[in-house]
Amino acid sequence: MSKENPVKVKFYNGENIPLELHKVRVVQKLNLVPVERRLAALYEGGFNTFRLSTKDVFLDMLTDSGTNAMSDQQIAAMMQADDAYAGSQSFFRLQKAVEEVLKKKYFLPVHQGRAAENILSCAYIKKKGGLIPMNYHFTTALAHITQYGGRIVELLYGEAYNLSSSHPFKGNMDIEKLEQVIRETGVENIPFIRMEASTNLIGGQPFSIQNLREVRRVADKYGIRVVLDASLLGENAYLILQREPGFEHATMAEVIALMTGLCDIVYFSARKLSSSRGGGICTNDETIYRELEALVPLFEGFLTYGGISVREIEAMAVGLYETLDETMICQSPQYIEYLVKALSSQGVPMVTPPGVLGAHVDAMTLCGHIPQTQYPAGALAAAFYLVSGVRGMERGSISNQRDEEGNETYADMELLRLAVPRRVFTLSQIKYVEDRMVWLHRHRHLIGGLKFVYEPPVLRFFMGGLEPVSDWPSQLIAQFKKDFGDSL
Ligand SMILES: *Cc1c(COP(=O)(O)O)cnc(C)c1O
């Protein structure tokens, strides 16, 4: 399916090895602590990988948020930051980058992606509630929409729920369903349509330009605004270049401009989009800008810093330009493709086709013996940390929120996400992940379920505490010792 490696290097032996077009000049030492320490760390952290301390973590594959490697150009730009409460030159450089890369002239800075979700939900949902049609939810987007009294409806095509698929655009929105929802709900009850680039929770799966054009057509027909969550915009654009007929020879800049041009409001987390901190909302519509403007000083800070340090603003600006560099953007998706193919070929159930931001293991299949009430994806995340020191993230029912009546809602997919931040890991580290996951898959029957002992009311996955339903971790360690001896 995928086009030739964009770095355009063929290997004599025919292998398709991701080749980096960068060198590593600053390094950070890692720890690989013994398995007994990892077990203790799991108990201290409530079997929740968010609560581990990095001193106990070998490869941190929790997230790509704020963990992509920065470039020398970004670090250099941070040195010229202009400290000012109002009117900072750093802000104007960022505004220019937004205009040149995202092609939107009005820009509101916010401290991170979810702050944009807060502002949009406050402006458009708080007074009247309403229904937000979307391709799929993201945890923080859903939490903000529901906090302000809104509801969501997810309109993916059925194929998106098929984890083992070859469909190139599982993030596409079902256009017929969209029209049907609009007709049934009434335009006046739909504040906006939300499209998420590289749909995160279904395994970083992209939508196509063709699909976004159809969403736009329906939105125009009914006079509804389209909001793009562009946190993973660069990767979605890269996969369009790789997979969408007609875009084989397009550039990143062209595809990104097409995507943002089809949407009225674009918001993003710069922790992902530009490998720094911060976030933003942008538009070409002055009315929209005025509707949102006042909320930035209320929640974030003055309009020329939005809760972001000026150094990070400089890094964000450079990072936005770097998003247009295909040899940079391809690095993480290529490692992910490598890992997904390696694991799939050895029988580990993976989300396919390979998406972006991480490799996703299908925990519902791998832990088929663990009922969903005992959180198979959370159990797999804990077990994998135990046997490897690698920290992934549960993206399943623990990451879901309870419904209005307080009932547990089970996720459509139980995934263990192994995030691959850009330009951070080496191929030998990826091979270590492969090796330990293949071992764990062979011994999967030793993994047991989890239960909550502490459940926060909002975004429970961040700080929730769990414990194993039986003493399965000791049995897993015993098998590990048998096979690996005193190897870490
Ligand atoms: C991470 C993410 C967000 C939230 O961004 P933060 O900077 O973590 O607040 C929103 N949407 C998507 C698609 C994301 O991946």
Image (cartoon, rainbow, N blue to C red):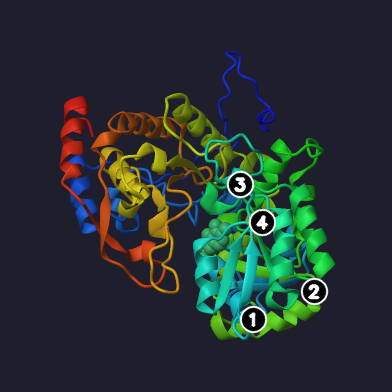
Whereabouts is ligand 1, in terms of quadrant?
bottom right
Say which amino acid is labelled 2: Asp
Residue 472 placement (x, y as % from top left): 19, 43
CA distance separating discs 4 and 2? 21 Å
Mark 2 C-beta closer than 8 Å to ligand 1: no
2 or 3: tag closer to the N-terminus:
3
Q: Nearer the viewer, mark 4 or mark 1?
A: 1
4 or 2: tag closer to the N-terminus:
2
For residue 285, the mark is 2
For residue 158, the mark is 3
Task: Say which element carries label 2.
Answer: loop
Write down the residue under mark 1. 123
Q: Would you say the residues marked 2 and 3 are in contact, meaning their CB atoms lie under 8 Å apart?
A: no
Callout 2: few (<14), some (14-19), or many (20+) C-alpha neighbours within 10 Å?
A: few
CA distance separating discs 2 and 3? 34 Å
Q: Is residue 80 visible?
A: no
